Structures are given as C-alpha cells and as structure tokens.
Image (tube, rainbow, N blue to C red):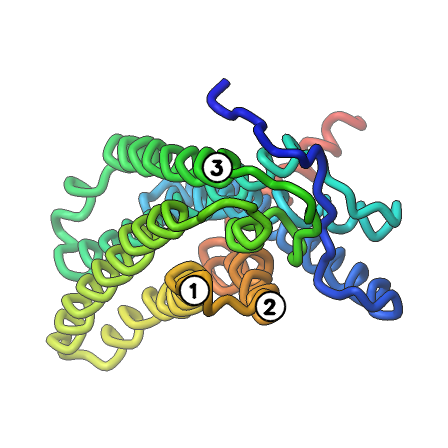
Amino acid sequence: MFLYNVSLVSEFIILGLTTRPELEKIIFIAFLIIYTVALIGNLIIFLLSIFDSGLNTPMYFFLGFLSFLDICCTSATVPKMLTAYVTKSKVISYYGCVAQLFFFTWPMGVELLLLTVMAYDRYIAIGNPLRYATIINRKVCIHVAIIITIIGSLNSLAHTYCTFRLPYCDDNKINHFFCEIMPLLKLACADTYINEIVVFTADFILGICCFCLTCISYVFIISTILKIRSAEGKRKAFSTCASHITIVSMYYGAVIFTYIRPRSSLSLEKDKIVSALYAVITPTLNPIIYSLRNKEVKEAFKRTVKGLLQHKLKSMT
C-alpha cells in the first residue's frame, strides 16, 4: 500500500455545510431531493445511451459517460453527508476519508477532460459533417474514454497520496461537507507547499488548459456557424452547443476558483457553496440541460418505457 498513516488522527469529523442544528433538517431534505434527481436523471441518460439503438452516436456515448461520472461524483459525497444528518454522527474514518477524496477527484478530473473532448466532437460535427462518422466513430470514442479515465485516475492517485502523506495531529475537524483537498491541507501539521504546487499544476493542466482548448473549439464552431446562410441552420447549430457552454462555464469556473488560489487566500465557508455547485448542483443539472429537453432522448425514453410495458404484458398473459 502506498499510503502510510504517520498521523495521530484515526478519524475525522466533517462539520458539514452548517453548524446550526435548526438548518440541518432543511439541508437534509434539499440535498436528498437534489441527489435523487441527479441519480435518476443521470441513470436514465446512462442506460438509454447503452441500450437504445437510436442513441448509438458519439455524442450520446459521451453524454452517457458524462452521466456515469456525475453519478460517481455525487455518490462519493452526498450519501455520507445525508447519513450523518440521520445518525447525528459526523465522524468518518481516516481511510474512509482517503477513499472519499479519491473517488471524488477521479470523476471530477475525468469530467474536465471529457468536456474538452465533447467540445471538439461538436466542432467536428458542425465544421466537417461529411467526415464526422469517419473521424469520430465508436472505436475512437472507446479509446478516448479509456485514455482520459487513465489520466483522471493518475491525477486522483497523485492528489490522494500527496494529501495523506501529511501528518494530521490534534485538529481533526474538516470545515466542509466532505473530505476535500483544501480543508484537509488546512488541518495538516506540516508544510503544505509541495501539495499546493501539485494542486496548482493539476488545476492548470486539467482546468485552465482544458478550458482554453474548449474555448478554441468554440471559436472555430462559432466561425463555422456564422458562415451558414440559413437562419434555421444557424439556430440548430447553436442549440447543439448552448447546453455544453452552460455546463462548461459553471463547472470550470467553480473548479478554477476553488483550486487555483494559494492557501493563504482560502475562505472555507465560501468554498463550501462553490464546491456544492460543481460537486452536487452541476451533476444534477447536466441531464436536464443536456438531454431531458432533447427530442431524441425523449423519443428514446418513450420507446424504452413502451418496450418494458409490452414485455410486462406478455409475461402476464
């Protein structure tokens, strides 16, 4: 095992979004609803992208993968928080905290890469539609998914190792609603300069560089759309990109704001809200913004429900 617990701490206490007991019930109900919506919405998109032949395209392959990552991201943090409100115990074991950090940073890192790939996919679809099926085919999609998953795993391993190689002495109260990197660095009783360098480097590569590549893709996309003569053609082209731009702006903005700053400028109370945006709210909005308003997804959902009902009726007769 590459992790060596040299700390005096065997468990952490996660303080949560608030320390005011009168607000805990409201937060519990709100996050229970949000998590349920996120889980059901993303699960529907994920399953439809796999089983419905009408969604057997690169765009829906990436959307299905995005939904899978969103399920992982929310499931790494929200259930533990909800359980804490029910049991009135905010304790998480040392290695439970290790696991939570890893399984949160993994989908987050992969998603940043995936959003960049999705921007390039839209550029090829709009800018070179005749060769789209040749350039972005099923084999390419699978290879891309494997590559960005490996990169995301290495990123998560690096963060997890660097964070938990530090000693944690007396203070074990995490001022957050899950085991996040920055609140943990606040608790470490050792110099965290190397950790800040690792966090800044990873955020620069996965955050700023990916964001810049996404922006470059959209510069070419917009340039291509402006060359389309018909107003209807322009509207359809813009509609395929509007959802992606919305999510990219929310997700990249929150991540860069949280991780790109030095430790001395951290405000953990404010960061809780920002973290909730990219860890919980954005994954909940993804299936709504991207897919549930999409005509093809609605038709696929109707076909699936109809097929299940017909199968049920046949089994009953």
- Residue 25 left/right relative to 145: right
Q: Residue lying farthest bottom?
A: 231
Q: Residues within 10 Å of mark 1 (few under 14, many from 20)?
A: some
In three-dimensional space, the C-alpha distance between marks 1 and 2, rounded to whole angstroms, equals 17 Å
Q: Position of residue 117 (x, y in %)?
A: 28, 49
Viewer-proximal residue among 313 and 125: 125
Q: Residue lying farthest top?
A: 1
Q: Position of residue 265 (x, y in %)?
A: 46, 69
The residue at the point 42 percent across, 44 percent down is 54
Q: Secondary structure at mark 2?
A: helix
Residue designated by label 2: 273
Q: Secondary structure at mark 1?
A: helix
Q: Are marks 2 and 3 in contact (CB under 8 Å)?
A: no
User: Quick check: 259 above or below 68?
Assistant: below
Q: Position of residue 95 (x, y in %)?
A: 63, 30
Q: Secondary structure at mark 3?
A: helix
Residue designated by label 1: 247
Tell which circle, 1 or 2, labels the residue nearer the N-terminal end.
1
In three-dimensional space, the C-alpha distance between marks 1 and 3, rounded to whole angstroms, equals 26 Å
Q: Position of residue 24 (x, y in %)?
A: 83, 63
Viewer-proximal residue among 11 and 286: 11
Q: Residues within 10 Å of mark 3 (few under 14, many from 20)?
A: many
In three-dimensional space, the C-alpha distance between marks 2 and 3, rounded to whole angstroms, equals 23 Å
Residue designated by label 3: 160
User: Quick check: 257 above or below 167?
Assistant: below
Q: Which residue type does callout 1 highlight? A: Ile
| Viewer-side label of 2, 3 | 3
Viewer-proximal residue among 173 and 143: 173
Q: Which residue type does callout 2 highlight? A: Ile
Q: Are marks 1 and 2 in contact (CB under 8 Å)?
A: no
| Viewer-side label of 1, 3 | 3
